[in-house]
Amino acid sequence: MVRDVSFGQYFPGKSPMHRLDPRGKLIMFIAFIVIIFCTFNYVSLGITAAFTVLFLVLSQISPKFYFKSLKVIIFIVIFTSLLNLFYGSGEPLWQWGILRITVNGINRAVFVTVRIVCLILAGSCLTFTTSPTELTDAIERLMKPLKVIRFPVHEIAMMMSLALRFVPTLLEETDKIMAAQKARGADMESGNLFKRVKALIPILIPLFVSAFRRAYDVATAMECRCYRGGAGRTRMKQIHLSARDVAAFIVTALTIGGVIVCNIFLKRVL
Amino acid sequence: MSCVLELKNLSFVYGKGTPFEKKAVDNVSLKIEKGEFIGVIGHTGSGKSTLMQMLNGLIRPSSGQVLLDGNDIWAQPKKIRDVRFRVGMVFQYPEYQLFEETVYKDISFGPQNQGKEGEALDKAVRDAADFTGLKPSLLEKSPFDLSGGEKRRAAIAGVIAMDPEVLVLDEPTAGLDPMGREVLLSQIVRYHKERQNTVLLVTHTMEDIARVADRIIVMNKGRPEMFAPTKEIFSRGDELEAFGLRVPQITAIMRQLRDKGIDVPEGVLSVDEAFAALVPLLQKEGKLW
């Protein structure tokens, strides 16, 4: 059911990836996104792919879950790579009506596939090994400079962690409500689109009602504990940089450097 | 008596192949007779709820079969909806499933899905409301304006309205005040008597189950460790305690009296029964005034 989706889930563990500083992981992830779209030849693409695999191995999470998260986006990958395959420029290698394949098109298709796959894998690696609390803590720390322009950093981070906290709860709730309505003969698996959308009403209304109820409960609970925003708050878990984080930074820097060097000295294929 | 539900080597495994893999129900085989009132007790996480959800095909078993009147409910997966109309299921905190504009419409959701129309539908809704003690004036109200206890009744009526042959109730009295609990329980008993159908009641309250159930299933770690008539189950208090359960308070008191050498019957299940047993004893000793 809904819970079978593994993308975005957190798997508790003690691997080197789990123990990295979440701030570092987030920065490296962002750097990785940038660099993966700056790969213009096969060597640099290979370097980023190798970098991804290295971190996947270090996360010590069964490859099964990575495949599962890829399954979600398989159609997007196929669709975009097909589009790219047929829309390349240059001399056609093969042509049939408006469909034509060029060397450029093949290159584009390969690049787009590898890039998206690496992106999803790296993203899964980040969420698999970083708990939602760590992640929002990291975001809060990294956005702290924005306080200067009166950006409500703490409030945004609190909203994010609350939202993330309730994702599994709401999923569970959805499962329960679905089961209850199915027990009353609700039919969600057949009929046309209009019928199916209508069949969602008995699920969505109770879900909204309970989401609001929970929101009120949380607000009351927070007020009972004298929550009054970010000013003067200290953290229970302090995050520190360690040798491990420095090593991870060096590997990331080397990858970025490698990609840049390859881009300068080798021929572009795109 | 004929057998209405039969479970054959039923098992269910949660999260197969993940680190969270867990055997929730482990090779369960048992038979439930038509018209019986069955109690299901067990510690939290003992697999009661999972087992119950397999009875009407909400969860497909990992292995084994559920036979309803001798037919495997999963023989035709497309017809599983018919099974759900025949085995009605009331979940824990059922009031969270209310969604319609009026109580009447919400109760009619189930029978309408069954294909009932017109007078038959109206009768089903009103009968169900009557069984659960909902006043007719409440039927036109929004379910969200009702009190907690009334919401619970409305939700239970929504399942009863489908007139299921087997009614499964998962902790229907949880979170109600003692009075509400008493009333709801007696309504379920009345419903059982009048419709002559089979009822399975899951509960944590031993006092409730001791009074109403014919037989009790004791679940522990996914296995039905005991399945016997109520009196027998509660006369084996030591075994129950090993599963993290206890006997009703009145049964425990009567057992202690027995241990002290006072001649009271074994397996007393209700206060009334205990009263009937104690009065002659006290009168004999002239201590009753």
Image: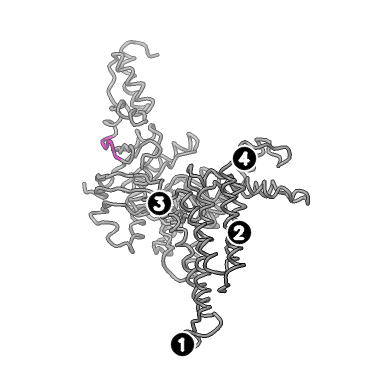
Looking at the rendered structure, the secondary structure element under dot 4 is: loop
User: Residue B195: where, in percent of width, then height?
Assistant: 33, 49
In the current view of this chain or complex, which residue is farthest to the bottom? A97
Q: Are marks 2 and 4 on the same chain?
A: yes
As drawn, the label of residue A257 is 2
- Mark 3, residue position: B160
Q: Earlier in the sequence, mark 2 or mark 4?
A: 4
Q: Residues within 10 Å of mark 3 (few under 14, many from 20)?
A: many
At 33% from the left and 37% from the top, the residue drawn is: B220
Judged from this view, the residue extending furthest toward the left is B1
- Closest to the camera, between mark 2 and mark 3, is 2
| Label 4 sits on residue | A240
Of residue A33 and residue B95, the one placed in the foreground of this image is A33
In primary-sequence order, the first of circles 1 and 4 is 1
Q: Residue furthest front?
A: A265
Q: Residue at x 69, y 47 (%)?
A: A155
| Disc 2 to disc 4, C-alpha distance | 26 Å
Q: Which residues are magenta?
A: B223-229
Would you place residue B289 above or below residue A151 in this image? above
